[in-house]
Amino acid sequence: MHDRSTEVARERSNLTTFVLSLGAFLILFDVTAVVVAMPGIADDLGFAGAGTAWVIDAYSLAFTGALLASGALADRFGRRRAMLAGNIVFLLASIGCGAAASAPLLLTARALQGVGAAFLGTGALALVAGAFPHQRRRAQAFATIGTISGVAMALGPTLGGLLAAWFGWRSIFYANIPFCLTLAFAVPRVVAETRESGGRPLDPWGIVLLTLSLGLAIDALLKPDAPSTVRAAGLIASAAAALAFVRQQWHSRNPVLDPRVFATAPMIGVGASLTSIQFGYWAVLVYLPLFLSAGLHVSMEVAGVALLAATLPMLLVPLLGGRLVTQWGWRRFFMVAFGTIASGDLLLVIAALSADATLRSIATVAGMLTIGVGAALANPQLGSTALALAPPAQAGMTSAMTMIVRQAGFAISIAALGATLRTTEVASAYAAPFVLATIGAVAGMIAAAALYPAPEAGASERRER
């Protein structure tokens, strides 16, 4: 009898983990799958040049701003309710994306998707803690979610390319519908509601200042034809809003994001690494399908398969990274990881500038594989490194801060690379964004060398923890 009840409890735990993992899969799949459809979207809806970056950035900008509200509202009104509300918004926005007849309608729907994704993801991750009070089971649940997220990141571009090639780019958004309906049916039946008594206060001013800062920066970067004074004014206003946000959070009694988390040199190094990987890898993925189309003249279907060279390492390499960071320490490990990403970006620069078709193809595949390996080493370790370097009492705030820095860095890096891209039709034009990506990755390598603890200190700290 005891064995039977234990087996039932295990099966229910596995089902709960799977259902919550589905939310993480949906969010990441939508981002990575859309990347391959960018050329088709640009052609159909008339996006010009770097304007296609707004298809990703509208989502990321709304996602980042909504993250500040989603945690507080989920704690106050219920994590399951927040997840289900986010799922409904995401479902309706996905239908809106698929049906969009113009660029403004698509961008509006993408922004709504970002809001829905923030509540969906925040609710799902918060529910893991309530569903698995024991640390071992909770760790297993997060490991499963991480694996499924890795599958979404690795296979999203390929599956998105196949869907776009067979059924058109709109099918990528319609593909979200069965996942959303599954979540709407399963979550109320499998996952119990949890909430925080009292909850955290909502910070509308913080949300406005952060969103305004990112929005102004992205808008300025993605206006290549605007007068330099207008773009400079936008960037200055963005910096002013960012400083106002930091000041407001610093003096708040209950900060949503406490800037003190990144007040030490090692944590500044983590912040720099989180931003650098967005420039060196994630933003590059957004422009690779366009480059493959212009430089290698491949279809969306072939581009999706080719991107496996850059994404499949996310499934295969992280276990190696876990062993290497233990043996080498943080400083050496992240120097090697970001050096690998920089080398891959440099190969892509060579591919963009090459006039020889064979050399361009070889350099492109080698570059994608190299950045994929480097990112697969660094990306999974950054979150755990941040938690190891931060005080234990700030673990929750550190997790929130790293998520915001990732999303904000992703939005800014896409815009920055897009600002250097003068045309999407000529292969050599992609050399400029790939150079900027290389500089970003090198900056991550320098930050690791200058700011991370020495190997002895890192090893000592890990033993203490």
Image (spheres, helix red, strand yellow):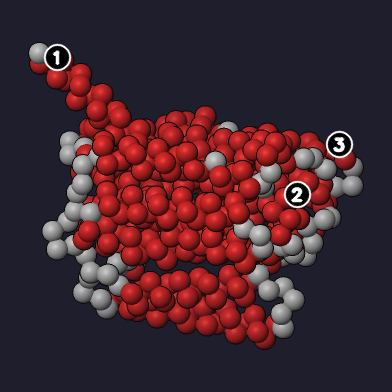
Q: Judge from the rendering whether residue 52 lies leftward or rightward of residue 136; answer left or right.
A: right
The residue that disc 1 covers is 3
Kind of residue indicated by mark 2: Phe
Observer-nearest residue: 56 or 84?
A: 84
How many numbered tags mark residues here? 3
Q: Judge from the rendering whether residue 36 lies leftward or rightward of residue 356; answer left or right.
A: left
Which label belongs to residue 291? 2
Q: Which residue is located at x 85 percent, y 47 percent?
A: 354
Observer-nearest residue: 65 or 184?
A: 184
Q: Give x and y (percent) for residue 312.
A: 58, 33
Kind of residue indicated by mark 3: Thr
Tell me, yes or no, if residue 132 can be seen here.
yes
Q: Which residue is located at x 19 percent, y 62 percent?
A: 199
User: Can you tell which quarter of the image residue 63 is in?
Assistant: bottom left
- Cα distance in 3D space between marks 2 and 3: 15 Å
On screen, residue 172 above or below 441: above
For the residue labelled by badge 3, is the local secondary structure a helix, a strand or a loop?
A: helix
Along the polypeptide, which appears first: circle 1 or circle 2? 1
Kind of residue indicated by mark 1: Asp
On screen, residue 375 above or below 437: above
The residue that disc 3 covers is 358
Tell me, yes or no, if residue 336 can be seen here.
no
- Cα distance in 3D space between marks 3 and 1: 62 Å
Q: Judge from the rendering whether residue 297 lies leftward or rightward of residue 31; answer left or right.
A: right
Q: Which residue is located at x 82 percent, y 47 percent?
A: 295
